[in-house]
Image (cartoon, rainbow, N blue to C red):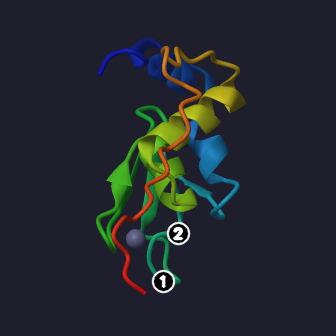
């Protein structure tokens, strides 16, 4: 933990949750917030809202909530690592990938199979 903490901060500083979310949902201005039908559950009323200043979203219907990383990961079905890599690329932020990058997954041969 902490290896990419500065990268995460940099990504949040460069990318706007509203700009990202707008690709997936039809956001409308509502006072200080942006609202839309929630992309995480079936509905027609706009329960989903974004606080642009704080960079957080919340849904009154299904209680989905979080920041830019949570939104992007959930809507694309990514784990945190994948979310971080994709958003870093989009933001033009270089990640510290660490020393162990190109180790392929070890192939396991099931032994003792009796066909
Ligand atoms: Zn919802």
In the rendered image, is residue 31 in sight? no
- Closest to the camera, between mark 1 and mark 2, is 2
How far, Cα to Cα, is label 1 from label 2? 9 Å
Which residue is more in the foreground, 105 or 53?
105
* In the rendered image, the vertical position of residue 63 relative to residue 101, given as above or below: below
Which residue is more in the foreground, 27 or 87?
87
The local secondary structure at tag 1 comes to: loop
Crowdedness near tag 1: few (<14), some (14–19) or many (≥20) residues, C-alpha within 10 Å: few
Q: Is mark 1 within 8 Å of ligand 1?
A: yes
Instruction: Write down the residue under mark 2.
Output: 39
Looking at the picture, how far across and down is residue 104, in whole percent?
56, 38
Which residue is more in the foreground, 109 or 104?
109
Q: Could you tell me which residue is drawn at 49 percent across and 21 percent down?
A: 100
Q: Which mark is residue 43?
A: 1
Q: Could you tell me which residue is drawn at 34 percent across and 61 percent down?
A: 64
Crowdedness near tag 2: few (<14), some (14–19) or many (≥20) residues, C-alpha within 10 Å: some
Looking at the picture, how far across and down is residue 40, in whole percent?
46, 70
- Quadrant of the rendered image containing residue 11: top right
Quadrant holding the C terminus: bottom left
- For ligand 1, which image quadrant applies? bottom left
């Amino acid at each position: 933990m902490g290896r990419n903490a500065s990268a995460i901060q940099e990504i949040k500083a460069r990318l706007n949750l509203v700009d990202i979310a707008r690709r997936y949902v039809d956001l409308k201005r509502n006072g200080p917030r942006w609202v839309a039908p929630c992309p995480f559950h079936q509905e027609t009323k706009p329960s989903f809202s974004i606080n642009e200043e704080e960079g957080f979203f919340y849904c009154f219907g299904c209680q989905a909530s979080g920041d830019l990383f949570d939104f992007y990961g959930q809507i694309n079905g990514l784990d945190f690592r994948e979310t971080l890599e994709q958003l870093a690329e989009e933001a033009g932020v270089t990640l510290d990938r660490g020393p162990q990058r190109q180790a392929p997954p070890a192939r396991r041969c099931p032994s003792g199979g009796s066909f």
